[in-house]
């Protein structure tokens, strides 16, 4: 091995002697931390560790090209060298290894190495591979539109470049020429899968397809990595767009402490890469350039050993967290006094539901300069598939109301990044049926960011999605999705059924610090008409409305079924049956006290929704009724919902046969009353 293997000279790269020595020291510290973590694991003191050894050159050199005072950093789980370079202390890392309460990244809630720190603009990382790339793109978009000086660096392995989230993010970064640097640490394996089975050709070449600059570099040559990273950062700061850097490297330990790498790599292969260890290459260089003496090297080693011993001692002795139920929501909504009377309609000009949504979005964009609306076809001149966003680009400009590529995971993922950067993202999913590609971003990211960062980050996003049937939308333009998402801690789910509620709930959702799934019943867009309250008007989340008072039975519904239930109540009244109609408005949080109060009055409960009955949201209400309202019930709880068929067949006659309707509600109510 020759030091001459390092192709660059640090001074020509603008690095001072102190800086190149600091680079070496950080790499050495990362290596020793890794060794220490593994030893702790093997001693049974740390249950799970992830290795970074071998990657230090790529990590420390690339992060040195950034400015921790203005830039953003999104490391992945292997990036000990990156987080040290960004200012983490060994203690911060070991607090995570021992999952202690004072672990600054997650308070012991996440696995070790899932880095995050809001005050240093290091965005929270999770475990699903590749979800971080759209986040980085969203942050970079916010920086670009604010005219900020910062750039964003995001890290991942070569395996992550097979995920859709990666491709969607690169596409978006290329389209907008974002100030983004993507570092792929290609260590030749995604767990046991060799790169040849992961990528056809070279990772860096993928940049071409996305209009990005792409470059492959020897990741074990820290000075070469630094040179490339510097160019990338300069490019980003000049406004010349993103760069994909593929740093070819190798990891010396197994994938994690749970992996046995002997199953898929020979010792000879590992040894051959160890001969090009980035730490040794840089050390040789420093010796030859007379910057590193034996004494200095020994001093560094012994300082690091002492620091790590102290950090391990302190971290291991630190207390564990004791509040796993806290900080699921930034604004938890606890049940209030039940609603007992029918709310009077607010004053206002009569509009339909879609107009109410459009006007509210205009008002909110004016009231909150940080609000941004984006999605497929939402910009003018089209203004959305249903015209919900009509006129917004014209008034507020295309930086704040913009079309995205046709990529739902990206839409939600950039929303996460925008929220991290202080925006209020209001993405539209064109039809709820097409939200499924974004399931991971919503469930694994949006909903968990607050909890997993122990309250450090918030994700105030409102995801609008037209949903439901009754418009001949067939199997893929009719679905009800509320049950999937009501199941997820960290999300709030609301469904308006009147224009006034559409405004009041949308305003509350946009002002709420937590993510809200705002489901708009398509059937009601033009059918539901009512007053549009001018000026300040809010409907609190988690608060149901009693739409009609009654004494014989309670009908609990939401969305289109709330509308139909009121029609049914009129028919039932003619037949001498007094039905109380409770419109939930919020699916989650559920306003149980209002349902219970109504039940106490009527003793009979009919739950109506257009989603499938099996494990539909009605099952939750029925379960709560039996748990908390058993003594109040004079009859079994009845559900009227769609049978177990895909919603909905296209032919009108077939759709009518399965989708709940007014006549069906009347029939079920009459039967229930007879029990
Ligand atoms: C979406 C998803 N699928 C599978 C996994 C399990 N998993 C964890 S790490 C990993 C390999 C990642 O390889 P690569 O991106 O090359 O990064 P490396 O770990 O090699 O640094 C896999 C499959 C996961 N965490 N997320």
Image (cartoon, grey):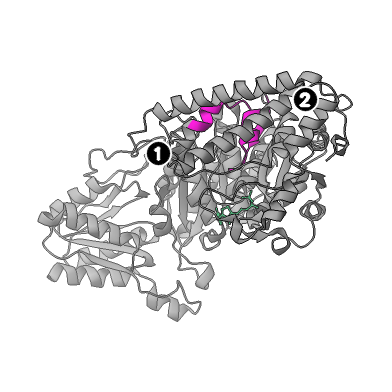
Q: Which mark is residue 635?
A: none
Which one is in front, 470 or 345? Answer: 470
Q: Quadrant of the N terminus?
A: top right
**Residue 533 visible in image:** no
Where residue 65 appears, as percent x and y from the top left, is: 76, 30
Please state the total of marks drawn on the protein image.
2
Q: Which residue is mark 2?
A: 20
Which one is in front, 577 or 172? Answer: 172
Q: Horizontal placement of 596 versus 477: left or right? A: left
- In which quadrant of the rendered view does residue 641 lie? bottom left
Report the span colored magenta. Answer: 70-94
Q: Residue at x 70, y 46 (%)?
A: 185
Where residue 77 appears, as percent x and y from the top left, is: 58, 43
The residue furthest front is 294
Q: Which residue is mark 1?
A: 329
Q: Nearer the viewer, mark 1 or mark 2?
A: 2
**Residue 20 visible in image:** yes
């Amino acid at each position: 091995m020759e030091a001459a293997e390092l192709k660059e000279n640090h001074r020509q790269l603008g690095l001072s002697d102190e800086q190149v020595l600091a680079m070496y020291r950080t790499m050495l510290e990362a290596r020793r931390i890794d060794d220490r973590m593994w030893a702790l694991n093997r001693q049974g003191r740390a249950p799970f560790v992830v290795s970074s050894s071998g990657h230090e050159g790529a990590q420390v050199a690339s992060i040195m090209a950034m400015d921790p005072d203005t830039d953003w950093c999104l490391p992945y789980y292997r990036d000990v060298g990156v987080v040290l370079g960004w200012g983490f202390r060994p203690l911060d890392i070991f607090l995570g290894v021992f999952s202690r309460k004072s672990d600054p990244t997650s308070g012991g809630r996440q696995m070790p190495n899932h880095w995050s720190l809001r005050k240093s603009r290091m965005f929270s990382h999770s475990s699903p591979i590749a979800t971080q790339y759209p986040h980085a793109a969203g942050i970079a978009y916010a920086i670009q539109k604010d005219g900020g000086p910062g750039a964003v660096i995001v890290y991942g392995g070569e395996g992550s470049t097979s995920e859709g989230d990666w491709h969607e993010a690169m596409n978006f970064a290329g389209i907008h020429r974002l100030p983004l640097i993507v570092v792929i640490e290609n260590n030749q394996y995604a767990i046991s899968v060799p790169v040849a089975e992961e990528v056809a050709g070279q990772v860096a070449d993928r940049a071409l397809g996305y209009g990005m600059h792409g470059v492959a570099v020897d990741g074990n040559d820290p000075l070469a990595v630094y040179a490339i990273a510097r160019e990338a950062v300069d490019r980003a700061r000049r406004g010349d767009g993103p760069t994909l850097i593929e740093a070819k490297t190798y990891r010396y330990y197994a994938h994690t402490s749970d992996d046995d790498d002997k199953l898929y790599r020979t010792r000879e292969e590992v040894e051959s890469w160890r001969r090009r260890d980035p730490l040794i290459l840089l050390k040789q260089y420093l010796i030859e350039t007379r910057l590193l003496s034996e004494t200095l090297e020994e001093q560094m080693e012994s300082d690091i050993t002492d620091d790590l011993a102290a950090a391990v001692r302190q971290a291991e002795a630190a207390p564990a967290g004791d509040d796993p139920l806290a900080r699921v929501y930034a604004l938890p909504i606890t049940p209030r006094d039940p609603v007992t009377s029918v709310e009077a309609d607010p004053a206002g000009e009569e509009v339909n539901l879609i107009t109410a949504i459009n006007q509210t979005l205009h008002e909110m964009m004016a009231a909150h300069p940080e609000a941004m609306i984006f999605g497929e076809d939402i910009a003018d001149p089209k203004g959305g598939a249903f015209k919900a966003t009509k006129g917004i680009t014209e008034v507020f400009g295309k930086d704040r109301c913009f079309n995205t590529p046709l990529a739902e995971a990206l839409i939600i993922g950039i929303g996460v990044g925008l929220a991290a950067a202080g925006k209020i993202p209001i993405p539209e999913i064109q039809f709820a049926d097409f939200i499924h590609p974004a399931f991971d971003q919503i469930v694994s990211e949006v909903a968990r960011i607050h909890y997993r960062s122990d309250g450090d980050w918030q994700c105030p996003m409102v995801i609008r999605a037209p949903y439901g049937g009754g418009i001949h939308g067939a199997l893929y333009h009719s679905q009800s999705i509320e049950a999937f998402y009501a199941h997820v801690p960290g999300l709030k789910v609301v469904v308006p059924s009147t224009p006034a509620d559409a405004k009041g709930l949308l305003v509350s959702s946009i002002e709420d610090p937590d993510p809200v799934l705002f489901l708009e019943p398509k059937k009601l867009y033009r059918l539901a008409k009512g007053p549009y309250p001018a000026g300040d008007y809010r409907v609190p989340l988690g608060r149901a409305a009693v739409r009609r008072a009654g004494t014989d039975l309670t009908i609990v519904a939401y969305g289109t079924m709330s509308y139909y239930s009121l029609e049914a109540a009129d028919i039932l009244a003619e037949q001498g049956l007094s039905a109380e109609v409770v419109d939930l408005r919020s699916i989650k949080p559920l306003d149980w006290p209002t349902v219970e109060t109504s039940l106490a009055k009527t003793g009979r409960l009919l739950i109506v929704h257009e989603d499938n009955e099996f494990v539909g949201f009605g099952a939750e209400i029925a379960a709560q009724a039996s748990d908390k309202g058993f003594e109040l019930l004079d009859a079994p709880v009845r559900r009227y919902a769609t049978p177990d068929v895909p919603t909905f067949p296209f032919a009108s006659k077939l759709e009518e046969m399965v989708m709940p309707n007014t006549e069906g509600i009347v029939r079920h109510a009459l039967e229930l009353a007879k029990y």
